[in-house]
Every structure is written in structure tokens, then in C-alpha cells.
Amino acid sequence: MSSSQLIQFTPQTQIQLFTHLKRSRFSGRVILQTEEETAEQWTFYFYLGRIIYATGGEHRMRRWERSLMAQSMDLYYLWVQKKIPQECDNSESFCLTCLKEDVCWEYQVLCTWVATQKMTTEDAMQNVRFTLTEILFDIQHQRQVSYCVVPDKMFSARLILSDTGEVIRKAHEQFVAWQKAKLADRSPNSLPMLHQPEIFQNQVPNDVYQVFSRLLNGKHTIRDIALKMKRDMTAIAAYLLPHVQSGTIELKQGPDFPALVIPHIDNSPPQKNQNINEQDILVACIDDSVLICQTMETIIHDAGYGFLSVNDPLRAIAILLARKPDIIFLDLVMPNANGYEICSQLRKLSIFKNTPIVILTGNDGIVDRVRAKLVGSSDFLSKPVDGEAVIGLIQKYVYHSSSS
């Protein structure tokens, strides 16, 4: 390992370093780290002088999931489903419990998906470009970083990025635009939250308020919001900045998604005991409307059941996989994903093959009912929700299925 050196990781410095490593046909890792008390660390992986991947930083898991969403929701769902064999079989499939951190699990997942034709080589390269661009932007945001070089002659690679210079240029253009928008003291990894919603509502058009009121909840970073809205992150941040300065919106520092924990997943449908207790039943509601979820929560809790609220449709499947509810109430119309798509994806998972899924909608039309049945829904419930109807559906599907 070389001794650590303190540098400003400007585009010029990046090009000089990467060119030197390319000429020397370096294989191994380059580790960069900030000098602050809350130090951040990034790792760049090289094979014969070329970058193959980079990872680390403040929001590693958020960035990984964002990179999949940016390309295709199918890739994101493929990741969420965790199609992993129960035992390592030395095939092209992978067992995440066997992955080693020093060879970067994200890169191994991409290689596996390419080898098993779940994604193309170009798709994998696009994922690498997306990741490198975000990381290089974040490192430029730091005043100085130290770096060290860790050679590894045993290192090998299947996927190699060829256009490093283009990625450096794009990251620098984003960083310059961020500075010109007077955002240099802000981070796109911060999580905006409406601090004074009434004032914000009076300051923006109603359609803008309807969108932002769902997203500015302290759970999504500026980058997340930009991706959901399919807008440039600098444009989003610049629009929010006056409201941040006035105190209407608060920028919070938030945690990453949970680190990668790979249990051996049981894909068999949950078995119900005939003697079910109400408190053992978990009812999930997926709806971007906080009011609907609060109404459902009151109904469910009053009946003695457990309740799970999901307001972000893009995170719904991941949350449901973690909690495995006994019945799911699913809104039909939501931003970025609709109930049909989510229901269809859930039915592709063996663990939810027999789970009751009830579609919630304010449009009680025959076409919606037919389409909901075609994607595998169990039933249909009109809004506004009726408490007796909700409890009746729980008793119909959960208790009936457990005793049949």
C-alpha cells in the first residue's frame, strides 16, 4: 500500500491519476477518504489500468438502488426479489453470503446479471457510469481528500469501463452547474422536509404543491426526488433553495438504506395456524395519500390487527418482502408506479403468490375491476374506505384461507 497523500480531487487531478494508473496497467484499489471527523471513504477498482467500478460514500445503498431505477424498474425489482439460490452452487448464479467486500458486491451482481443475460453489457456499463458520476461529484464537493493505492495482482474483471474521461467531464459539468446555482454549501444527499406546509402551499401552484407534499417528507434525498420527478437534481435543488432559506423547507442529514444483509430467504408462502389471533395478523396499506393510510391505520388498530403503512410505491416491494404482511391493500393510482404494476410484480414472487391483495380506487369502473383481476388482485375496494368493508375483507381472506 502506498503512503497516503492529501489532494484536491479536481477533474485535472482525476485525469492525471487515472492516466498514470492506466499507463502502469495497475490492478487493485484506490481508496479516497475525507479528513473530517465524520470521514467518508470511496473505493475505486482498477483492472490493468482501467476503472471497473467505484463504491462507498455517504449513501452507498441509496445510490445502488437509484442506479437500478434510473435504468429500469425491472432491474430494480430483480434486485428486490433477490433471486438467489439457497446454497452456493458455483454456477453463474451468486450467493450473496459468499460475496467478499474487497471485490465489491455491486460489481459482482452486475457481472452475474450480464452472465445470466438478465442485463446487457451496455446496461451494466451504464450503471457503472451512473455510479461513477455521482461519486466523482460528491468527491469534488469535498475540499481535500487523502488517497492510497492498494495493488492486487490477483484481481480480475469481466466488465471494464472505456470512457472514463466522459464520466469525469459529466460529473464536473454537474458540479459546476451546482455551484452556479449557489448550492455549493448544500448536498444533493440531503433530505428535504416540509417544515411549514401551509406557507409552502400558498407560495407555489397547486399542482406543484401536490407533487412536493408527497416527496418532501424527510425520507427522500434531493437526488431521489429528481429521479422520481425525472428532472435534473440541480434544477430541483435550485427551485427548493428559496424555501429552504426562508425556513419553509428544512434540509436534513439522513441515514442510508440498511446495509446489505443477506439472509437465506424462505420463498415458501407463509403458513397460517387455524387458531389465529388478531394481534398476529399484519395488514399492509400501500397508498401515497397520508390521509388514506391514517384512516386505514385507525380502522385496523381498532380491530386489533397489526398495521404497516407504505407511502412510497417504489419502495413498496422491498418493505413488503421484509415484513411479509398477511393481506395487502393497494392503491391503484400513485406517482411513478401504479397498483397494477405492483400487484403484477408481487404475484411473480412465490412468497406473495397466495397473499390477498385488495385494490383501492376512487374509480369503481368495470374496466378497472377486470384489469385488476388480470394482474392477480383478490378483490376491489372503493374509496373512501368503509371500516366494516375493510374488516370484512380481512376476515374473508385471512381467516378463510387459514381454515381452508
Image (cartoon, helix red, strand yellow):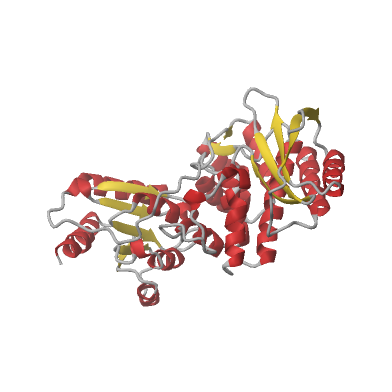
**Quadrant of the image for the N terminus?**
top right
Q: Quadrant of the C terminus?
A: bottom left
Q: Quadrant of residue 398?
A: bottom left
Query: Residue visible at 80% across and 52% down?
Result: 164
What residue is shown at x 71% (from left), y 48% (from top)?
132
Residue 355 visible from this viewpoint = yes
Q: Nearer the viewer, residue 325 or 360?
A: 325
State the residue in front, 180 or 212: 180
Q: In the image, 256: left or right of 397?
A: right
**Rendered location of residue 246, percent (x, y):** 63, 31
Percent across and percent down for residue 115 are 60, 66
Above or below, 184 against 162 in this view is above
Q: Residue at x 80, y 45 (%)?
A: 172
Residue 323, above or below 366: above
Query: How far across and down, in percent of the image, does residue 102 sit?
Result: 61, 43
Image quarter for residue 157? bottom right
Image quadrant in which you'd find residue 383? bottom left
| 354 on left or right of 180 | left
Image check: 327 left or right of 404? right
Q: Residue furthest left?
A: 275
